[in-house]
Image (tube, grey):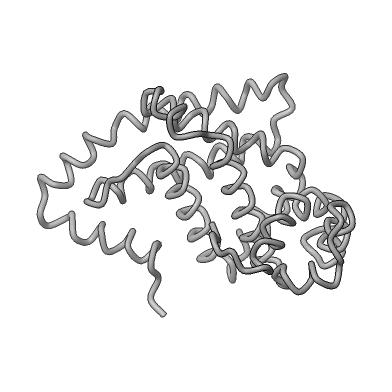
């Protein structure tokens, strides 16, 4: 999430969700940026200057906008009152709710990120989303647990998205049921950590792998 207060960053973040909604009709394109700008009373020329030009950049900026809206929806004291697995559940479901007006655009975004030339960017974006959701849930881990939590949640988020984009059930009941089944993995965090810590030979290689997802080599 871009927390910059520069004028263009502020405009980009204001535009983000509206761009996603217009990408349903115009695709991830300059036309979607123009339509979004008009809808929220921003000069389209300024909007084009503030928003990324390429599809990957547009999708990443949209995800940032979702993150900002998600953080605004969950005051720290409200999240703290829930059990950890329930925190993750309500945060992830709220994320889907925020993306609902752009669901068809999200489908297109997933297809774009699945292209061979975009796979690494897609993995980074999924990792970043998982990291931000964990931080919103109150996680402050900096040890190996930091990586295991994000690895599992990024997998849960990705698989839940694939169910959600085709879910026509009332109240997304199929998505909710799928997510609840997958969230049993959250209870495995401490077990995973203990197992990996018990093997000095395996732990470093895994840490290097997930570290590359977070800070890929240049």
Q: Is residue 200 left or right of residue 99?
A: left
Find residue 31 and report its image quarter: bottom right
Q: Up-down: is 31 above or below 89? A: below
**Which residue is found at the position 70% from the left and 48% from the top?**
106
At which x and y percent is residue 178?
53, 27
The quadrant of the rendering that contains the C terminus is: bottom left
**Which residue is found at the position 53% from the left and 35% from the top?**
92
Q: Is residue 21 left or right of residue 154?
A: right
Q: Residue furthest bottom?
A: 218
At which x and y percent is residue 55?
70, 66
The quadrant of the rendering that contains the N terminus is: bottom right
At which x and y percent is residue 90?
52, 28
**Which residue is found at the position 59% from the left and 64% from the top?**
5
Compare residues 160 and 34 and report the one nearer the observer. Answer: 34
Q: Up-down: is 140 above or below 181? A: below
Find residue 195 and report its image quarter: top left
Find residue 206 and report its image quarter: bottom left
Compare residues 139 and 201 and report the one nearer the observer. Answer: 139
């Amino acid at each position: 999430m871009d927390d910059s207060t520069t004028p263009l960053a502020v405009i980009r973040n204001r535009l983000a969700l509206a761009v996603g909604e217009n990408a349903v009709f115009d695709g991830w394109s300059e036309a979607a940026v123009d339509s979004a700008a008009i809808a929220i009373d921003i000069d389209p020329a300024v909007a084009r200057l503030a928003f990324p030009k390429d599809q990957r950049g547009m999708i990443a900026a949209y995800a940032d906008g979702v993150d900002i809206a998600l953080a605004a929806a969950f005051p720290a004291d409200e999240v703290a009152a829930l059990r950890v697995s329930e925190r993750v559940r309500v945060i992830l479901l709220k994320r889907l709710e925020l993306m609902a007006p752009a669901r068809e655009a999200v489908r297109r975004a997933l297809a774009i990120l699945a292209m061979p030339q975009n796979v690494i960017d897609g993995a980074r974006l999924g990792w970043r989303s998982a990291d931000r959701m964990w931080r919103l849930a109150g996680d402050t881990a900096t040890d190996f647990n930091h990586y295991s939590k994000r690895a599992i949640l990024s997998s849960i988020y990705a698989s839940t998205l694939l169910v959600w984009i085709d879910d026509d059930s009332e109240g997304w009941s199929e998505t909710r049921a799928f997510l609840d089944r997958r969230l049993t993995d959250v209870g495995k965090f401490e077990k995973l950590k203990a197992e990996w810590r018990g093997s000095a030979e395996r732990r470093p290689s895994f840490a290097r792998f997930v570290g590359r997802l977070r800070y890929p080599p240049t």
